[in-house]
Image (cartoon, grey):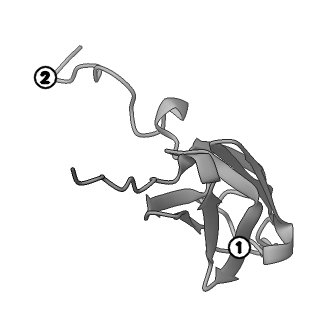
Amino acid sequence: RGAGFSRPVGPTFLSPVTRRQFPLVNFSEDEGHVYLEALAPGVAPQDFDLSVIRNSITISGERNAYAEEKEHIVHRMELGSGRFSRTLELPVDIDPNKVSAECKDGIMLVTLAKAEHARPKKVKIKLS
């Protein structure tokens, strides 16, 4: 090792360990639902598949390759293409019959109703 250069500890920028999963997601919840936003530019709504089992959701599909110009020399190709699949564990069980999804501006918005047994129950207190 010369001139003060050393090998970095842990994963590096181009290491496969640091590769982000696709699609990137946010999720939140309220008393009755879990809401998921999946950032998926370039993926048509008909190219998505959603699967819900108890407290997990799998988002899968395919992103088509961009057309390459034959006269161009490609120096970098960071926009991935091909099949993808991502499974996320949710904070509660979901009712698989009450799931809706829509795509808008490259973002898939998914609304998942919590299973009845996962919803908070109000208990009345008797006064004596």
What amino acid is at disc 1?
Ala
In this picture, residue 121 sits left or right of residue 23: left
Q: Which one is earlier in the sequence, the residue at label 2 or at label 1? A: 2
- Towards the viewer: 15 or 74: 15
Tell me: residue 35, above or below residue 120: below
Residue to which mark 1 is pinned: 101
Tell me how far mark 2 sits from mark 1, CA to CA.
53 Å
User: Residue at image x 65%, y 51%?
Assistant: 94
Q: Is residue 37 left or right of residue 47?
A: left
Q: Is residue 103 above or below residue 119?
A: below
Residue 54 pos. (x, y %): 69, 42
Q: Return the residue nearer the eye: 17 or 60.
A: 60
Residue under label 2: 4
Q: Is residue 86 above or below residue 29?
A: above
**For the point 45% across and 53% down, which residue is it?**
120
Q: Give the tally of numbered discs.
A: 2
Q: Residues within 10 Å of mark 2 (few under 14, many from 20)?
A: few
Q: Residues within 10 Å of mark 1 (few under 14, many from 20)?
A: some
What is the x, y in percent for residue 76?
58, 58
Type of residue at label 2?
Answer: Gly
Q: Residue furthest top?
A: 1
Q: Position of residue 50 (x, y in %)?
A: 78, 57
Residue shown at the point (86%, 73%) measured from the top left: 46
